[in-house]
Image (cartoon, rainbow, N blue to C red):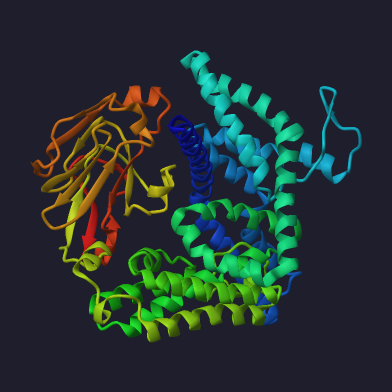
Amino acid sequence: MEATQTAASGTKEKSNSIMNKILDAIGGAFAPILGVLAGSGLISALLSILKTLGWISPESGTYAILSAAGHAIFYFFPIFLGITMANKLGANGYVGGAIGAALLEPNYTNLVASEAQDVSFMGIPVILASYSSTVFPILIAVSIYAVLDKFLKKIIYKDLQMFINPLISLMVIVPLTVLLFGPFGTYVGEGLAIIIEFLSSTSGVLTGAVMGASWSFLTILGLHWAVIPIFIANLAKSGLDPLMAMIAAAPFAQMGMAIGVFFKTKDKDLKTLAGSGLLPGALAGTTEIITYGLLVRFKRTMLIVAIAGAIGGAINGALGVNGTAFALPSFLSIPVFTPIGQFLLGVLTSLAIAAILILIFGYEGKNGTASAKTVKEFGLADVKSETIYSPIIGEVLPLSAISDPLFSTETVGKGVAIEPAKGEVNSPADGTVTTLFPTGHAIGITSENGAEILIYIGVNTIKLKGQYFNAKIKQGDQVKKGDLLIEFDIENIKAHGYDIKTPVVITNTNQYIDVEPVQTGKVNANEELIKLKA
């Protein structure tokens, strides 16, 4: 019996591990381009407003150019997703992009447009399909390419890999995509769209309530990445997506909750926290401050956000509201949804209910105040303005250059990336070594003025298990600016296929008014890198 339970437990853990890897891969592929997706969606919203007001003609050159700006990312989505997915899986992003580009190359698209018959590849019949704006085909294709790329790196001589690996990968993966992965991925996307359409038509109220209630928590768990491709697939197929309208109730419920906390609390710091989360939520649909500053701290807010989101989602589901372009739900993206009146009824109901319930029942916290722990953890503790100096000789890059979405999306904190030219990490400030990974690939320094600085050498270099890293200090040591902390072997790390770009981030970013990088291009160790304004 015990052996059976152990086996079942092991199977479950393996299943969870596989699912986590899939979600992590999808999340890592979408995270770097989520901003441009949202920005492009807002262009569509702006054009919709201008067209409705009669300020621009759909036949004008101005409209055509702005429309191109707004739709380019979606039309060429397989290319962008091919790049980010390959980077996430440790393969060559440019080969991933080339695989996506092959599906949009005129020689192939002309076959689709002309509805050519009896098309084959080496005698194997080809099912022609249009892959512009598609999601699942390229995700599947690049996942297989990443496996092939790892295999090729093991068997191809290192000096030949630069051109032999892309040559073999493109010749194998592109035909397989057209023959197998593409049609399969298309059917998967269409199947999901049919299921969602069936659920919406059968019970839009129930579907909307479930989506509106659960979306905030799916986001916290990272499970929302599995749903976002469905949004884009629906939009590519019909130009409409009901799910976006349903889940839009959730961020509006969070904003309503923040409004309620803002007016309910007498605690100055908590009021500041609630207020600071409203602006990015209202204008850009980014509710991280509200989610992690309020929702995950006060359990009562979870129930209230779920109730408000369920009601707003049910309204939008019942009234048949759809999104017409991908956009993060916010006040600026309202024109993306249709009919606008019904959409406003749903999301503003969510916002109002959440705010009213907080004002009536509170948000949980004695006398409406935040504990000292809450104040410290969510960026309200005392820190001082200071300058952080470069720990590495190299070239300064934006964090978006890092393929790891935890850094590229500034989830960990704001800062910069550095492409090292010398394998040494020096202390960026006077302070204490508060974290030193056993593998030596990452270190955390807390400065004397309160800045929490994380230096993470390379991407996924934890897998090297400490090989090629040599820490010169230990956790708890006091260090001075410029002290040598870690030595690492750049060439050997690169030879094992790892990206050596190194993020230098301020993990307590929320405690500062401004985190401003002051260096671009080449930088030497101990030169000014980031200014922190408290």
Q: How many marks?
A: 0
Snapshot quadrant of residue 304: bottom left
Q: Is residue 441 above or below residue 253?
A: above
Q: Is residue 32 left or right of 529 when viewed as pictured?
A: right
Snapshot quadrant of residue 206: bottom right
Q: Is residue 199 above or below residue 269?
A: above
Q: Residue furthest front?
A: 1
Q: Is residue 309 left or right of 492 when viewed as pictured?
A: right
Q: Is residue 148 above or below residue 87?
A: above
| Residue located 20% across and 33% down the image | 486
Residue 218 drawn at (x, y percent): 50, 58
Snapshot quadrant of residue 379: bottom left
Q: In terms of depth relative to the viewer, which is nearer, 370 or 7?
A: 7
| Residue located 81% across and 22% down the image | 122
Q: Is residue 435 left or right of 98 when viewed as pictured?
A: left
Residue 231 drawn at (x, y percent): 64, 58
Residue 42 drawn at (x, y percent): 57, 67
Q: Quick one: quadrant of the C terminus?
A: bottom left
Residue 172 drawn at (x, y percent): 67, 25
| Residue located 31% across and 72% down the image | 273
Q: Is residue 161 visible to the viewer in this orientation of the structure?
A: yes
Q: Is residue 47 visible to the viewer in this orientation of the structure?
A: no
Q: In terms of depth relative to the viewer, which is nearer, 486 or 304?
A: 304
